[in-house]
Protein backbone atom coordinates (compact mmCIF):
# COMPACT_ATOMS: atom_id res chain seq x y z
CA UNK A 1 0.00 0.00 0.00
CA UNK A 2 2.80 2.38 0.92
CA UNK A 3 4.52 1.59 -2.36
CA UNK A 4 1.35 2.44 -4.28
CA UNK A 5 0.98 5.75 -2.44
CA UNK A 6 4.62 6.57 -3.15
CA UNK A 7 4.19 5.85 -6.86
CA UNK A 8 0.99 7.93 -6.96
CA UNK A 9 2.70 10.84 -5.23
CA UNK A 10 5.67 10.62 -7.57
CA UNK A 11 3.38 10.60 -10.60
CA UNK A 12 1.55 13.65 -9.26
CA UNK A 13 4.83 15.51 -8.82
CA UNK A 14 5.96 14.62 -12.33
CA UNK A 15 2.68 15.75 -13.90
CA UNK A 16 2.46 18.90 -11.78
CA UNK A 17 6.11 19.72 -12.41
CA UNK A 18 5.69 19.29 -16.16
CA UNK A 19 2.61 21.49 -16.10
CA UNK A 20 4.43 24.16 -14.10
CA UNK A 21 7.35 23.98 -16.50
CA UNK A 22 5.03 24.31 -19.48
CA UNK A 23 3.30 27.31 -17.90
CA UNK A 24 6.66 28.95 -17.23
CA UNK A 25 7.80 28.34 -20.80
CA UNK A 26 4.56 29.79 -22.16
CA UNK A 27 4.89 32.86 -19.96
CA UNK A 28 8.49 33.31 -21.07
CA UNK A 29 7.49 33.02 -24.74
CA UNK A 30 4.70 35.55 -24.24
CA UNK A 31 7.12 37.96 -22.59
CA UNK A 32 9.63 37.56 -25.44
CA UNK A 33 6.85 38.19 -27.98
CA UNK A 34 5.79 41.31 -26.10
CA UNK A 35 9.35 42.62 -26.03
CA UNK A 36 9.67 41.94 -29.77
CA UNK A 37 6.41 43.76 -30.47
CA UNK A 38 7.50 46.78 -28.43
CA UNK A 39 10.88 46.90 -30.19
CA UNK A 40 9.22 46.77 -33.61
CA UNK A 41 6.65 49.39 -32.63
CA UNK A 42 9.37 51.71 -31.31
CA UNK A 43 11.40 51.42 -34.52
CA UNK A 44 8.37 52.01 -36.72
CA UNK A 45 7.18 54.92 -34.60
CA UNK A 46 10.62 56.50 -34.92
CA UNK A 47 10.25 56.28 -38.70
CA UNK A 48 6.82 57.89 -38.45
CA UNK A 49 8.22 60.74 -36.36
CA UNK A 50 10.93 61.43 -38.96
CA UNK A 51 8.27 61.30 -41.65
CA UNK A 52 6.18 63.88 -39.81
CA UNK A 53 9.17 66.24 -39.69
CA UNK A 54 9.60 65.88 -43.46
CA UNK A 55 5.91 66.52 -43.99
CA UNK A 56 6.25 69.70 -41.98
CA UNK A 57 9.15 70.77 -44.20
CA UNK A 58 7.01 70.08 -47.26
CA UNK A 59 4.17 72.10 -45.77
CA UNK A 60 6.55 75.02 -45.14
CA UNK A 61 7.71 74.79 -48.77
CA UNK A 62 4.12 74.96 -49.94
CA UNK A 63 3.42 78.03 -47.81
CA UNK A 64 6.13 79.86 -49.76
CA UNK A 65 5.34 78.34 -53.16
CA UNK A 66 3.41 79.73 -56.09
CA UNK A 67 -0.33 79.09 -56.40
CA UNK A 68 0.34 76.66 -59.23
CA UNK A 69 2.68 74.55 -57.09
CA UNK A 70 0.31 74.72 -54.13
CA UNK A 71 -2.57 73.47 -56.25
CA UNK A 72 -0.48 70.58 -57.54
CA UNK A 73 1.03 69.37 -54.27
CA UNK A 74 -1.37 70.29 -51.43
CA UNK A 75 -3.62 67.31 -52.14
CA UNK A 76 -0.53 65.08 -52.32
CA UNK A 77 0.48 66.20 -48.84
CA UNK A 78 -3.03 65.48 -47.55
CA UNK A 79 -2.89 61.99 -49.07
CA UNK A 80 0.50 61.34 -47.48
CA UNK A 81 -0.80 62.43 -44.07
CA UNK A 82 -3.76 60.05 -44.43
CA UNK A 83 -1.42 57.19 -45.29
CA UNK A 84 0.77 58.08 -42.32
CA UNK A 85 -2.25 57.97 -39.98
CA UNK A 86 -3.26 54.57 -41.40
CA UNK A 87 0.24 53.28 -40.69
CA UNK A 88 0.09 54.68 -37.16
CA UNK A 89 -3.15 52.78 -36.48
CA UNK A 90 -1.71 49.56 -37.93
CA UNK A 91 1.40 49.89 -35.76
CA UNK A 92 -0.80 50.24 -32.67
CA UNK A 93 -2.81 47.16 -33.71
CA UNK A 94 0.37 45.04 -33.71
CA UNK A 95 -0.08 44.71 -29.94
CA UNK A 96 -2.65 41.95 -30.57
CA UNK A 97 -0.58 39.98 -33.08
CA UNK A 98 1.53 36.85 -32.77
CA UNK A 99 5.32 36.96 -33.19
CA UNK A 100 5.06 35.59 -36.75
CA UNK A 101 2.37 38.09 -37.70
CA UNK A 102 4.43 40.94 -36.23
CA UNK A 103 7.40 40.04 -38.41
CA UNK A 104 5.23 39.95 -41.53
CA UNK A 105 3.57 43.23 -40.59
CA UNK A 106 6.94 44.86 -39.94
CA UNK A 107 8.21 43.92 -43.39
CA UNK A 108 5.07 45.23 -45.09
CA UNK A 109 4.98 48.45 -43.05
CA UNK A 110 8.66 49.12 -43.73
CA UNK A 111 8.01 48.84 -47.47
CA UNK A 112 5.13 51.28 -47.26
CA UNK A 113 7.14 53.66 -45.10
CA UNK A 114 9.96 53.60 -47.63
CA UNK A 115 7.56 54.34 -50.47
CA UNK A 116 5.98 57.28 -48.63
CA UNK A 117 9.39 58.57 -47.63
CA UNK A 118 10.57 58.51 -51.25
CA UNK A 119 7.45 60.37 -52.36
CA UNK A 120 8.04 62.95 -49.65
CA UNK A 121 11.61 63.54 -50.78
CA UNK A 122 10.42 63.88 -54.35
CA UNK A 123 7.69 66.35 -53.32
CA UNK A 124 10.14 68.41 -51.28
CA UNK A 125 12.38 68.82 -54.31
CA UNK A 126 9.50 69.54 -56.68
CA UNK A 127 8.05 72.23 -54.41
CA UNK A 128 11.31 74.18 -54.05
CA UNK A 129 11.28 76.94 -56.65
CA UNK A 130 14.45 78.92 -56.04
CA UNK A 131 17.79 77.66 -57.28
CA UNK A 132 19.53 78.35 -53.97
CA UNK A 133 17.03 76.39 -51.88
CA UNK A 134 16.97 73.55 -54.38
CA UNK A 135 20.76 73.35 -54.32
CA UNK A 136 20.82 73.17 -50.52
CA UNK A 137 18.16 70.43 -50.46
CA UNK A 138 19.78 68.42 -53.27
CA UNK A 139 23.17 68.49 -51.57
CA UNK A 140 21.58 67.56 -48.25
CA UNK A 141 19.85 64.55 -49.79
CA UNK A 142 23.04 63.41 -51.53
CA UNK A 143 24.91 63.65 -48.23
CA UNK A 144 22.18 61.61 -46.55
CA UNK A 145 22.45 58.97 -49.30
CA UNK A 146 26.23 58.81 -48.73
CA UNK A 147 25.73 58.38 -44.99
CA UNK A 148 23.25 55.54 -45.44
CA UNK A 149 25.49 53.71 -47.92
CA UNK A 150 28.45 54.05 -45.53
CA UNK A 151 26.33 52.74 -42.64
CA UNK A 152 25.27 49.79 -44.79
CA UNK A 153 28.87 49.02 -45.73
CA UNK A 154 30.00 49.23 -42.09
CA UNK A 155 27.29 46.84 -41.00
CA UNK A 156 28.23 44.35 -43.70
CA UNK A 157 31.95 44.63 -42.85
CA UNK A 158 31.22 43.92 -39.19
CA UNK A 159 29.13 40.88 -40.15
CA UNK A 160 32.01 39.20 -41.98
CA UNK A 161 32.97 37.90 -45.40
CA UNK A 162 29.70 36.10 -46.21
CA UNK A 163 27.54 39.20 -45.73
CA UNK A 164 30.05 41.42 -47.53
CA UNK A 165 30.29 39.10 -50.52
CA UNK A 166 26.52 38.54 -50.67
CA UNK A 167 25.84 42.27 -51.01
CA UNK A 168 28.98 43.36 -52.84
CA UNK A 169 27.12 43.90 -56.12
CA UNK A 170 24.25 45.68 -54.35
CA UNK A 171 26.63 48.20 -52.77
CA UNK A 172 28.43 48.71 -56.09
CA UNK A 173 25.11 49.32 -57.83
CA UNK A 174 24.04 51.83 -55.18
CA UNK A 175 27.30 53.74 -55.52
CA UNK A 176 27.00 53.79 -59.31
CA UNK A 177 23.42 55.08 -59.09
CA UNK A 178 24.50 57.69 -56.59
CA UNK A 179 27.23 58.91 -58.97
CA UNK A 180 24.69 59.13 -61.81
CA UNK A 181 22.43 61.30 -59.67
CA UNK A 182 25.36 63.45 -58.56
CA UNK A 183 26.36 63.92 -62.19
CA UNK A 184 22.85 65.08 -63.02
CA UNK A 185 23.17 67.64 -60.26
CA UNK A 186 26.51 68.88 -61.56
CA UNK A 187 24.94 69.29 -65.00
CA UNK A 188 22.12 71.36 -63.51
CA UNK A 189 24.28 73.72 -61.47
CA UNK A 190 25.55 75.74 -64.43
CA UNK A 191 22.32 75.94 -66.43
CA UNK A 192 20.15 78.93 -67.24
CA UNK A 193 17.00 79.53 -65.21
CA UNK A 194 14.83 78.09 -67.97
CA UNK A 195 16.98 74.98 -68.27
CA UNK A 196 17.08 74.65 -64.49
CA UNK A 197 13.27 74.59 -64.27
CA UNK A 198 13.15 71.70 -66.74
CA UNK A 199 16.07 69.67 -65.39
CA UNK A 200 15.29 69.90 -61.67
CA UNK A 201 12.21 67.69 -62.12
CA UNK A 202 14.35 65.08 -63.85
CA UNK A 203 16.81 65.24 -60.96
CA UNK A 204 13.94 64.82 -58.45
CA UNK A 205 12.76 61.69 -60.29
CA UNK A 206 16.28 60.23 -60.25
CA UNK A 207 16.66 60.96 -56.54
CA UNK A 208 13.35 59.24 -55.80
CA UNK A 209 14.43 56.08 -57.65
CA UNK A 210 17.75 56.09 -55.79
CA UNK A 211 15.96 56.51 -52.45
CA UNK A 212 13.75 53.51 -53.12
CA UNK A 213 16.66 51.39 -54.33
CA UNK A 214 18.63 52.23 -51.18
CA UNK A 215 15.71 51.47 -48.89
CA UNK A 216 15.20 48.09 -50.59
CA UNK A 217 18.87 47.28 -50.00
CA UNK A 218 18.55 48.26 -46.33
CA UNK A 219 15.51 45.99 -45.91
CA UNK A 220 17.20 43.11 -47.75
CA UNK A 221 20.24 43.34 -45.50
CA UNK A 222 18.03 43.47 -42.43
CA UNK A 223 16.22 40.32 -43.59
CA UNK A 224 19.60 38.64 -44.16
CA UNK A 225 20.64 39.31 -40.56
CA UNK A 226 17.25 38.34 -39.11
CA UNK A 227 17.18 35.01 -40.97
Image (cartoon, rainbow, N blue to C red):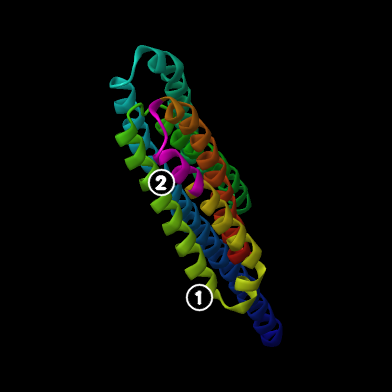
Tell me if I can see residue 156 in this picture: yes
> Quarter-wise, where is residue 160 in the image?
bottom right
Contact between labelled residues 2 and 1, with CB atoms less than 8 Å apart? no
Q: Which mark is residue 95?
A: none
The residue at the point 58 percent across, 71 percent down is 21
Give the main secondary structure of the magenta stretch: helix
The residue at the point 48 percent across, 54 percent down is 34
Quarter of the image containing the C terminus?
A: bottom right
Q: Is residue 92 above or below residue 147?
A: above
Q: Earlier in the sequence, mark 1 or mark 2?
A: 2
Residue closest to the far bottom: 3
Give the residue number, with chain letter if any, for mark 2.
141
Q: CA distance from mark 1 to mark 2?
A: 26 Å
Number of marks: 2
Q: Which mark is residue 158?
A: 1
> Quarter-wise, where is residue 156 in the image?
bottom right
Give the residues drawn in magenta, as a range: 183-193
The residue at the point 40 percent across, 39 percent down is 190
Q: Position of residue 57 (x, y in %)?
A: 32, 33
Q: Position of residue 72 (x, y in %)?
A: 45, 16
Q: Which callout, 1 or 2, points to the residue nearer the camera?
A: 2
Amino acid sequence: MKTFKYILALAFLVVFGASACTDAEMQSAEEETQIKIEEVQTALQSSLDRMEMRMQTLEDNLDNASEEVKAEWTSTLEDLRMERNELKNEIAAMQEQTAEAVQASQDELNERLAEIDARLNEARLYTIETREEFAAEAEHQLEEIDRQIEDLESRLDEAGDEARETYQETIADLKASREEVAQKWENIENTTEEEFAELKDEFADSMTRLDMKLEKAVQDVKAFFDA
